[in-house]
Amino acid sequence: MKTTSNWQIVCTVDDLVPESGIAVWTEDGPVAVFYLPHRLPALFAISHTDPFSGANVLARGITGDIRGEPVVASPLYKQHFSLVTGQCLEDESVQVKTYPVLLDGDKIRLGVQKSGKDTKAA
């Protein structure tokens, strides 16, 4: 079985809201895309699912900065997740998935991993 990256278009620049996130649907499930225009890079993408509640709410969280690390606070239980690594700052055993994200003209693309059977002959 091999894994490949598929650059999926999930929204446009006009869909983004500065200093906050939006929820998008991907082949891998719901993803939260954050636009922080005062940072470089300015785009971040993590799983939209809060691992503590199981609810799809992280895009609605409040963005901020803790010791230079861009974070989002879950709107439910207030845990902070790094937008760079997905690591929960309050519980190091918990981490959300991160996604590569890029600007392609006016489109936002996410690198979504697809698993499939390797069709090469042995």
Image (tube, helix red, strand yellow):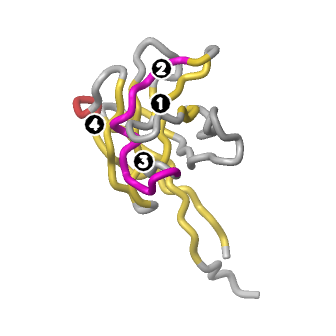
- Look at label 3 and name its amino acid: His
Image point 42% across, 21% down: which residue? 36
Tell me if residue 10 is in the magenta stretch. Answer: no
Q: Residue furthest bottom?
A: 122
Q: Position of residue 44 (x, y in %)?
A: 48, 33
- The Cα atoms of the two marked residues, 1 and 3, are separated by 11 Å
- The Cα atoms of the two marked residues, 4 and 2, are separated by 23 Å
Q: Tell me whether the residue at label 1 lies in contact with that at label 3, contact meaning CB atoms closer than 8 angstroms.
A: no
The region drawn magenta spans 52-65
Asked if residue 28 lies left or right of residue 120, the reply is left
Residue indicated by mark 4? 12
Residue indicated by mark 1? 72
Image point 60% across, 21% down: which residue? 69
Q: Tell me whether the residue at label 1 lies in contact with that at label 2, contact meaning CB atoms closer than 8 angstroms.
A: yes
- For label 2, the SS is strand
Q: Position of residue 75 (x, y in %)?
A: 38, 36
- Look at label 4 and name its amino acid: Thr
Q: Position of residue 47 (x, y in %)?
A: 48, 48
Within 10 Å of disc 3 (Cα), the crowding (few <14, some 14-19, many 20+) is: many
Residue indicated by mark 2? 64
Rendered image quadrant of residue 74: top left
Q: Foreground residue, 84 or 27?
A: 84
